[in-house]
Image (cartoon, rainbow, N blue to C red):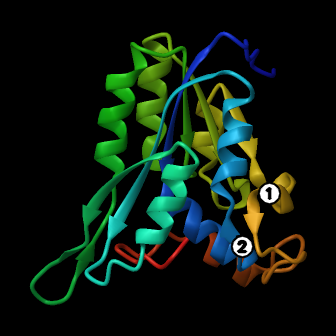
Amino acid sequence: MAVIKQKEQRVAMLIDTQNLYHSARNLYGAKVNFGAVLKEAVAGRHLIRAIAYVITTETEEEKPFFEALNNLGIETKTKDLQIFFGGAKKGDWDVGIAVDAIRLASKVDCVVLASGDGDFVPLVEYLKYMGTQVEVITFGRSASGRLREASDDFIDMCDDPRKYLLGFRGGNPGGESGSRRGRRQATRRPKEGSNEKV
């Protein structure tokens, strides 16, 4: 059953940048067109806030990307890559995204989560319990099935990848239906802290 999207709905969009970036790269060898993703997610409704969560590196090579997001009206929240003794790296925003979603839920009618990460299932269930419509937009081939089922609406960017990707020339590294290797790469979690230009 398709969810009804009313033009007067107030929408907040939270973008798990690393998740979308790695899915686009592994599935299609391309970069995400965040402007197209935002437009599709908002669907003509009243956008209250759009926030992209990003990991920064010491080289600061991601600055042009941050500027591009700001030009689209997307705020950026940054977190430094953590490097632990022994070389282990950590850089994710799961808790920050969840906290912001809960904070914003009382101020909007709909929260759109741009991520395929199954760790967000309890968040989606909680927001729905509190009466907030929850929609997910992501690449379905690399998304959690449980996240798809939990959301009120699921927009699968794999249905029309040209619409959501920059530099996509058709086909994909894993084949149209996805080879075994391609599916395995797409479904694994992104490397923590990897922050190439998106």
> What amino acid type should be assigned to the residue bearing mark 1?
Cys
Q: Quadrant of the N terminus?
A: top right
Q: Is residue 9 above or below residue 52?
A: above
> What amino acid type should be assigned to the residue bearing mark 2?
Leu
- Residue on which the image places disc 1: 158
Instruction: Give coordinates of residue 130: x percent, y percent.
Output: 42, 12
Residue at horizontal 31%, vertical 84%?
Answer: 59
Q: Secondary structure at mark 1?
A: helix
- Residue on which the image places disc 2: 27
Left or right: 55 as drawn, with respect to 134:
left
Residue at horizontal 80%, vertical 22%?
Answer: 2
Residue at horizontal 58%, vertical 48%?
Answer: 72
Left or right: 121 as drawn, with respect to 97:
right
Q: Are marks 2 and 1 in contact (CB under 8 Å)?
A: yes
Residue at horizontal 26%, vertical 60%?
Answer: 79
Left or right: 160 as drawn, with respect to 128:
right
Q: Quadrant of residue 165?
A: bottom right
Instruction: Give coordinates of residue 104: x percent, y percent.
Output: 38, 23
Q: Between residue 82 and residue 57, name the one nearer to us.
A: 57
